[in-house]
Amino acid sequence: MPAPITAEQARADRDTLLDTAERLFYERGIQAVGMDAVRAGSGLPLKRIYRCFATKEDLVVAMLRRRDLRWRGSLAAHVEQVADPRERVLAVFDWLAAWFAEPGFRGCAWINAHGELGATSEPVRAEVRSHKREFHDQLAGWVRAAGSPATEPVYLLAEGAMVTAGITGDPAPARHARDAVAALIPR
C-alpha cells in the first residue's frame, strides 16, 4: 500500500498541475489539451490529478484564478513604482508593451478562455468576468488618482490593445493605446 500523500506533497502536486496546465493551455488552447497531456507534462498519475481537481473545468478555473493574482500583482508592482499619478496610468501601457513583447505571448489568457469556453462553462465565464472586473477596478483607481473621469475609455484602450496584440503578434498596440491615453488624461 502506498504511503498517504502529505499536505506538503498535495500542495506541490497542485502547483505542478497548475504550472503545467497554464503553460499547455496558454500555448495550445484549453480544448486542444487533454488531461493525458496534462498528466504527461506534470508527471503525475491521473488519479492524483483528479484528486486535486475533480474536472478539467475545475483545473481551468483554478489556473485562471492563480494567473489573475500573479498578473495583476505584477502590473501593480510596475505601476506603483511611478510617483506621478498620470504617469502611473501611462505605465500600465508600458507594462502591457513589455508583456506583449515576451516570447510566446498569445494574447490575454482570459479572453482566450472566454473564446473557447465562455458560452459553455458558467464557472469559466464567471472567472473571466471576475478577472476583467478586478482589472477594471484596478485601472479605475489609477485613473481617478490622476484626476480623470476617463476610466471607461482607458479600460477599453487597454483591452483593445490586448486583443489586437494577441491577434497580430505585434506589441505596437500598447504604444498606440498609450498615446491615446496620454491625450485623454490632462497634465
Image (cartoon, rainbow, N blue to C red):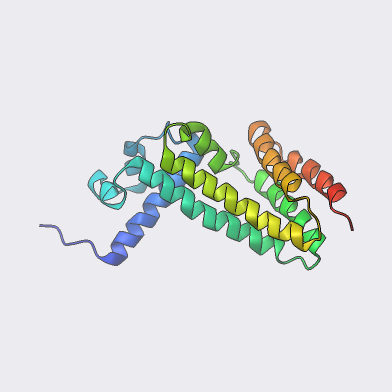
Q: Nearer the viewer, residue 79 or 144?
A: 144
Quadrant of image for the N terminus: bottom left
Q: Residue at x 46, y 46 (%)?
A: 22
| Residue at the outermost right position | 187
Quadrant of image for the C terminus: bottom right
Q: Nearer the viewer, residue 73 or 186?
A: 186
Residue 91 is situated, as x and y percent measured from the top left of the image, at 75, 56
Q: Quadrant of residue 180?
A: top right
In the shown orientation, is residue 32 left or right of residue 5? right
| Residue at the outermost front position | 149
In the shown orientation, is residue 134 left or right of residue 13? right
In the shown orientation, is residue 32 left or right of residue 149? left
In the shown orientation, is residue 171 left or right of residue 13? right
Residue 31 is situated, as x and y percent measured from the top left of the image, at 42, 32
Q: Residue at x 84, y 53 (%)?
A: 185
Q: How many marks?
A: 0
Q: Residue at x 87, y 47 (%)?
A: 183
Residue 86 is situated, as x and y percent measured from the top left of the image, at 81, 59
